[in-house]
Structures are given as structure tokens and as C-alpha cells.
Amino acid sequence: MTPAVARLKLAVVQAISRNGGKDSAALTAKRQPSTVGRWHNRNDDVFPPVECAFELDQLCMVLGDAPPILSAMAAELGHVVHRLPSVATSTMNPNDALVAAMAEFGDIAAAIQAAHRDGKVCDQDCSEITRQIDEAQASLARLRALYCAAAGA
């Protein structure tokens, strides 16, 4: 087993464990527990089919975790999985939405400057920076949704 395949196998094992073990994961994936047991065995090079990996990852996401199998596959290809924030359809005009998104980036810069003002970044600073980044991502998602809706996509 190559290192890349071993890392993917580890992600499958994590997904099955997060799904409650092989018996629960078998119900999620609609497969026999013995089949899921092979997927869960680190020394067995059998992997779940795509639709089963999707189901296992989906339950992980419902439980509040990242999708381990998808994340591992993306990492092997040099990418990262990032969940887009869900946003309601906006009635803003495109210029206002763009200005709002740009303002959020200013808020990120202000939070970073405030965090470094005393020469050390504490947990409260990290929380504020993260909050500002999350707000910027939501603003960009609204801008994206606005343009996708305008294009009919």
C-alpha cells in the first residue's frame, strides 16, 4: 500500500469510527457489516465505493465534523475542502454587495492589528480574527449567490 493510499485508508477508518463503528456504518452505507469491516481494516486494500464514501462523510458532517474521506482525497491532490457558508438570497445590488465584502476585509485587518498591538496574540484575539474571517466568507458567499442568481446558475 502506497503512503497516499494508506492516508486515504486512515480517513476511511476515521469515517467508519465516527459513524459508530462497522455495524452502524454498514447501516449508513447500506452494505453488509463484513464488507464495512474490510473497509475498516487498515491492512485490507478494499475501499468503499464512491456512493458509500459519500454517505459516510455526509453523516460525519451532520455530526459537525469535516468529511474525512473527501478531505483526505483533496489533500492528496494538493487541495483543501472548505465548506461554504449557507446564505439567504440577497436583494442587494451587486455594487453594495461588493462594497460590503470589501468592508469585511477591512474588519479582518483591524482585528489583526488590534491583536498585535500588545505584542502577543491571545485566545480572545484569535476568536475575534476568526469571527471577522467568517463574516468575510459569508459576505463573499452572498456576493457569489447574487451573481449566480443573476446568471441563472
Image (cartoon, grey):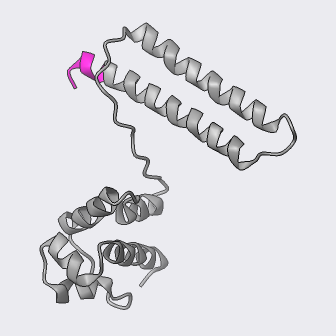
77 lies above or below 90: below
**Does residue 124 show up magenta in the picture?**
no
Q: Is residue 139 left or right of residue 28?
A: right
**Residue 51 x, y percent position in the rendering:** 18, 64
Point out the image quarter for the C terminus.
top left
Specify the segment rendered in magenta. Answer: 147-153
71 lies above or below 29: above
Which residue is painted at 29% across and 72% down in the image? 19
**Residue 14 x, y percent position in the rendering:** 39, 74
Q: Is residue 124 left or right of residue 89?
A: right
- Write down the quadrant of residue 29 in the picture: bottom left
Q: How many marks?
A: 0
Q: Nearer the viewer, residue 65 or 122?
A: 122
**Residue 115 x, y percent position in the rendering:** 76, 37
Which residue is painted at 25% across and 83% down in the image? 22
**Residue 147 x, y percent position in the rendering:** 32, 19
Q: Residue furthest right?
A: 119
Q: Main secondary structure of the magenta part?
A: helix
Which residue is painted at 31% across and 12% down in the image? 91
- Write down the quadrant of residue 62 in the picture: bottom left
